[in-house]
Amino acid sequence: MRKLIFGMNLSLDGYIAATGDDIGWSGPPNDELFQFWLDHERANDLVLYGRKLWETMSAAWPTGDQQPDATPARIEYARNWRDTPKVVFSSTIDKVDWNTRLVRGDAVAEIARLRAEDGGQMGIGGATLAGAAMRAGLIDEYVLATYPVLVGGGTPFFTALDSWVNLNLVETRTFPGGVTLTRYETRR
């Protein structure tokens, strides 16, 4: 069985985007935090995206290594992003590219099927998609990079749940700028 990990940047009050899908509060990550996310993404054998996050990532990373200000880590992130197999869950997108497969059907059923397969870990991103997987009890680990900012509303990291999910703290560390990383495993 594969491990499913949900990890994103979020505000101290729990939002991955402020009202209007604004993520400007997180600014560009410092080099140390960016390296953490690069290492995290390298460990994924498959990444699952909802439509909004797919649109954001596919607008930036296919050519991220060709930007004049691209650092070695950003060049590696772009290459890894293109090379890693991806699945996008959307009923409105017509076409995907860059080593990606489109799924229009039941996301929870497909995530459960993928999770039951042999293979390495999978990452999941996008509030709606991850929320559905969270409610279905499919997420094995949560990785939160919490920024010291309150945005007051927007897209929450955590969705409403039908029952408690008990977690074990695996790691905590602080990055420059006061960003705190916490990693939790789901207690089963």
Image (cartoon, grey):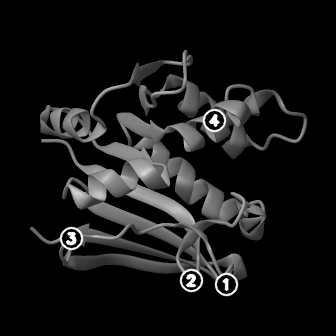
Residue 13 circle label:
2
Query: Given contact means CB atoms under 8 Å apart, are the residues at marks 2 and 1 in contact?
Result: yes
Which quadrant of the figure has residue 137? bottom left
Distance in Å between CA atoms under marks 2 and 4: 25 Å
Residue 162 circle label:
3
Local packing at callout 3 (Cα closer than 10 Å; few below 14, some 14-19, many 20+) is few
Amino acid type assigned to the residue bearing label 1 in the image: Leu
Residue plotted at (16% across, 33% down):
113
Distance in Å between CA atoms under marks 2 and 3: 21 Å
Residue 79 circle label:
none
Q: Earlier in the sequence, mark 3 or mark 1?
A: 1
Q: Earlier in the sequence, mark 3 or mark 4?
A: 4
Local packing at callout 2 (Cα closer than 10 Å; few below 14, some 14-19, many 20+) is some
Secondary structure under the numbered disc 4 in the rendered image: helix
Residue plotted at (18% across, 74% down):
163
Amino acid type assigned to the residue bearing label 3 in the image: Asp
Query: Given contact means CB atoms under 8 Å apart, are the residues at marks 2 and 3 in contact?
Result: no
Q: Earlier in the sequence, mark 1 or mark 4?
A: 4
Judge left or right: residue 118 versus residue 10. left
Nearer to us of marks 2 and 3 is: 3
Distance in Å between CA atoms under marks 1 and 4: 25 Å
Q: Earlier in the sequence, mark 2 or mark 3?
A: 2
Query: Given contact means CB atoms under 8 Å apart, are the residues at marks 1 and 4 in contact?
Result: no
Amino acid type assigned to the residue bearing label 4 in the image: Glu
Amino acid type assigned to the residue bearing label 2 in the image: Asp
**Mark 4 = which residue?**
55
Residue plotted at (75% across, 70% down):
25
Q: Earlier in the sequence, mark 2 or mark 1?
A: 2
Distance in Å between CA atoms under marks 3 and 1: 26 Å
